[in-house]
Image (cartoon, grey):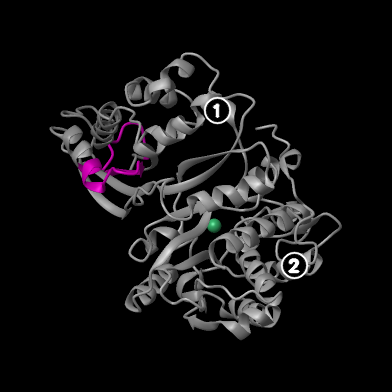
């Protein structure tokens, strides 16, 4: 684990001294106490209603200035700017949280939904993913409105309620905005949660904060091999399991070479002055000319591997026989692919089907979400986000990157040309490693306050 001391990078913590940080921490604790878990049809509505009531009662200036719409369990809060000709600023977060893994309940120092608050931390599920961002965005806007600022640019807060599951809320909110002809100059959504050790990128001593301008795609395929069963004394043509394994091995062998996509080229360009490790140091002096060599080096490094590869993970295998002398019937394997930005599901299908030829194994697409559009550091909002981050986190290099998971942001591509996935809060690597989707999720008061300052400054620079 990275040994970065994030607090050594915190600076300007005295700014906005009149912001109610203690109250903000209390409101976050209350938001965490709402057990907002999406379970599709059988979702318990009450915690979402409690969260909505909390939002309505906690931010009087936002409520007075904005239209608040409940769209199913999603929330759409539109705070109109004084200049309607300007494209709006769109701030995202999701209300839902992942459940506590069964069996880990007693491992939590404080109940996951107790909304526990102590001297140093706000504890509970959602503290980092991502009620800190949801409430923090409201705190920042409330602060500006309360002190008398009137945004020129319309600010829209869009809070889906099923990001961790189906993402239908975001899809619906985006469709509503599109139907109204709303355009967003830029959009802020969740991204990487902590600071990154530059050593991973060949730049030891450097600390990075990434602003993600795309996301990887997601694809599940099932491979099926027919089997007749029968006595294993004559496995002529191989058993279903054998043919399935051959197919998996061929797909793995046929995987595309590592590639340096435009975003990762930009990451290395931004880092080039700091890269000290050879042969990378020499190679990144001309990223385009040395793209294949850089991609090869990155692919061989665990942390960078997903940034240069469309990955495949063989995760499920079904259909083995129950006895060593009985051949298996039908067998299947489910493979999860994560697509580099720029790679499509059709590209993966062509790769897989090419490799399957002659094996008798078939591939069925189960689920696919395309990779995000490739935005860039040159687009709207990026420079302001980077400025706000480096204002409050000193000696940190901001670099463009992409997220390897998925977020709601991809649903908004039709209303926004610049989608920025970045979390303004910078908790410790340890808090992130154990807490996000894990045990003892928590955010320090200091981290929460600092992230709110980033949001206030971003809004000051972009919407006033
Ligand atoms: Zn999240």
Q: Which residues are magenta?
A: 322-349
**Total numbered labels placed on residues in the image:** 2
Of callouts 1 and 2, which one flags the residue occurring earlier in the amino acid sequence?
A: 2
x, y (%) of residue 287?
Answer: 38, 25
Observer-nearest residue: 361 or 230? 361
- Whether residue 1 appears in this view of the structure is no
- Determine the secondary structure under disc 2: helix
x, y (%) of residue 9?
Answer: 72, 40
x, y (%) of residue 364?
Answer: 23, 50
Q: Where the C terminus falls, by quadrant?
A: bottom right
Q: Is residue 338 magenta?
A: yes
* In the image, residue 430 above or below residue 71: above
Q: Is residue 278 magenta?
A: no
Residue depicted at 76% across the width and 66% down the height = 19
Q: Which residue is mark 1?
A: 200
Judge left or right: residue 209 versus residue 382: right
Judge left or right: residue 197 versus residue 123: left
- Whether residue 377 appears in this view of the structure is yes
Q: Where the N terminus falls, by quadrant?
A: top right
Q: Please identify the quarter of the rendering in which residue 123 is found.
A: bottom right
Residue depicted at 16% across the width and 35% down the height = 354
Observer-nearest residue: 19 or 175? 19
Tell me, for residue 24, which label it has, or none: 2
């Amino acid at each position: 684990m990275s040994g970065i001391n994030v607090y050594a990078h915190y600076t300007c913590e005295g700014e906005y001294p009149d912001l109610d940080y203690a109250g903000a921490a209390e409101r976050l604790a209350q938001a965490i106490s709402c057990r907002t878990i999406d379970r599709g049809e059988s979702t318990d509505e009450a915690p979402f209603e409690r969260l909505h009531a909390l939002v309505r009662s906690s931010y009087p200036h936002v409520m007075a200035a904005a239209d608040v719409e409940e769209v199913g369990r999603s929330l759409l809060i539109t705070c109109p700017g004084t200049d309607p000709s300007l494209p709006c600023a769109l701030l995202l977060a999701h209300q839902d949280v992942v459940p506590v893994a069964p069996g880990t309940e007693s491992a939590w120092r404080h109940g996951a939904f107790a909304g526990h608050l102590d001297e140093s931390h706000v504890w509970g599920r959602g503290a980092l993913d991502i009620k800190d961002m949801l409430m923090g965005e409201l705190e920042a806007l409330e602060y500006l409105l309360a002190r008398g600022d009137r945004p020129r640019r319309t600010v829209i807060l869009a809070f889906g309620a099923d990001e961790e599951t189906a993402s239908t809320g975001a899809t619906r909110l985006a469709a509503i905005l599109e139907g109204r002809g709303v355009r967003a100059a830029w959009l802020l959504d969740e991204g990487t949660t902590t600071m990154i050790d530059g050593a991973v990128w060949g730049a030891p001593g450097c600390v990075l904060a990434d602003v993600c301008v795309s996301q990887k795609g997601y694809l599940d395929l099932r491979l099926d091999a027919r089997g007749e069963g029968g006595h294993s004394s004559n496995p002529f043509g191989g058993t279903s399991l054998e043919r399935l394994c051959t197919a998996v091995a061929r797909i793995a062998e046929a995987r595309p070479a590592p590639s340096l996509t435009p975003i990762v080229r930009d990451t290395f360009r931004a880092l080039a002055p700091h890269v000290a490790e050879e042969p990378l140091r020499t190679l990144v002096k001309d990223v385009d000319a040395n793209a294949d060599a850089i991609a090869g080096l990155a692919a061989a490094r665990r942390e960078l591997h997903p940034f240069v590869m469309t990955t495949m993970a063989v995760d499920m295998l079904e259909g083995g026989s129950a006895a060593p002398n009985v051949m298996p019937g039908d067998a299947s394997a489910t493979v999860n692919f994560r697509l580099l930005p720029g790679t499509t599901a059709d590209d993966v299908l062509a790769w897989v089907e090419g490799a399957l030829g002659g094996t008798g194994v078939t591939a069925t697409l189960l689920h696919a979400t395309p990779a995000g559009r490739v935005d860039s550091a040159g687009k709207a909002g990026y420079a302001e986000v980077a400025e706000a981050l480096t204002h409050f986190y000193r000696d940190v290099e901001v670099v463009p990157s992409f997220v390897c998971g998925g977020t709601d942001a991809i649903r908004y591509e039709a209303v926004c040309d610049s989608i920025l996935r970045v979390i303004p809060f910078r908790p410790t690597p340890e808090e992130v490693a154990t807490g996000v989707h894990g045990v003892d999720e928590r955010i320090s008061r200091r981290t929460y306050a600092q992230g709110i300052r980033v949001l206030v400054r971003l809004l000051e620079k972009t919407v006033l």
